[in-house]
Image (cartoon, rainbow, N blue to C red):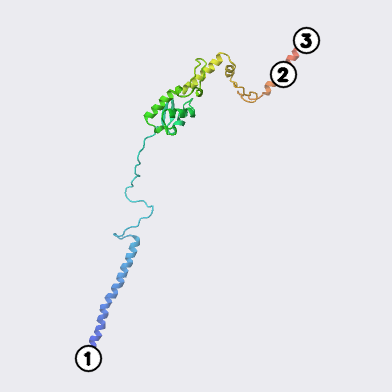
Amino acid sequence: MAKKEETKEIKEKPQDAHKKEAPGKEAIPEVKKEKKGDKSHEGKGEEKGHAKKERKGAPKEGKKEGPAPKDAGPEIKHIIRMADTDLDGKRSVQYALTGIKGVSRRIAKILALNSGLDPIATLGYLNDADIEKLHVSVDNLQTIVPFWMMNKQNDFMTGEDRHVIGTDVILSLNEDLNTMKKIRSYKGVRHEKGLKVRGQRTRSTGRKGRTVGVSRLALTAKAAAAKEGEKTEEKKGGGK
C-alpha cells in the first residue's frame, strides 16, 4: 500500500508542476504582445505620454513672435529746400548741391568745406544746425568763391563779377539775349532768326521746318518762271 501511495504522489507532482508552469508560459507571450503594441503606438504617437519629434523647418504651434525691433536711428530727410530748389536727401552733400543751377561739383565741395561739413556725408542725415550753415554759405557764395570761378564776370551793365544761382541764371541769360537783339549785334540777329551763333556749319546741319533738303518742285517752278521771263524779254525786243 505504501508503494501505491508513493507512485500516486509522483504522478501528481509532474502534473502539478505542469499546471503551475502553464500560466507562466502563457503570461510571457502576453507581455510580448504588449511590447509589440507599445512599438506600434510609438511610431504613430497615439500615447499621451509620448513626446512628438519636431521636423526641421516646420511651423511652430502658437502665436508667432515677430522680429525683434531694431534700434531706430535718425530719420532721413528725403527733400531739402535750398536756393529755391528741391535737393535729394539720399545723395551726398557734394553731389546734392549740384542740383542747384549754377553750382558745379567744385563749387559744391568748397561750400561743404566752408560750412565745416564732410562732402561725402549724406545730406538727409544732417541736423538742422548743419543745414542752416549750408544755407548761409550758399547765400554768401560770392564772398567764398574766387572771381575766376564766377559765372558772370565783368557784367555788361555794372562791370562787376557776380555768381548767379537758381532762377537768376535763366533771368540773366534772357537779359543778355535781349540786349544783344536790341543793339543789333551779329549774335543777336542770329538768335532772332534761330540760326547757329558760334560759327558752326549750316549747309548740311541745323536745318529746321517741314522741308529738309532741296525741293524739286520749287526748282522746277523757278526754272519755269525764268523761261517765261526770257520769252517776254525776247518778244519785247522783237517788237522794237
Q: CA–CA distance between discs 3 and 2?
A: 20 Å
- Judge whether 157 appears above or below 201 on screen: above
Under circle 1, the secondary element is helix
Label 3 Cα neighbours within 10 Å, binned few <14 / some 14-19 / many ≥20: few
| Residue with the mark numbered 3 | 237
List x then y, in percent, for residue 119: 44, 32
Q: Earlier in the sequence, mark 3 or mark 1?
A: 1
Q: Earlier in the sequence, mark 2 or mark 1?
A: 1
Quarter placement of the C terminus: top right
| Residue with the mark numbered 2 | 224
Q: CA–CA distance between discs 2 and 1?
A: 169 Å
Q: Is residue 169 visible?
A: yes
Q: Label 3 sits on what residue type?
A: Gly
In depth, the one of 238 and 195 nearer the eye is: 195
Is label 3 in contact with label 2 (beta carbons under 8 Å)?
no
In depth, the one of 93 and 202 nearer the eye is: 93
Residue 134 is marked as none
List x then y, in percent, for residue 21: 27, 78
Label 1 Cα neighbours within 10 Å, binned few <14 / some 14-19 / many ≥20: few
Residue 180 left/right relative to 31: right
Q: Label 2 sits on what residue type?
A: Ala
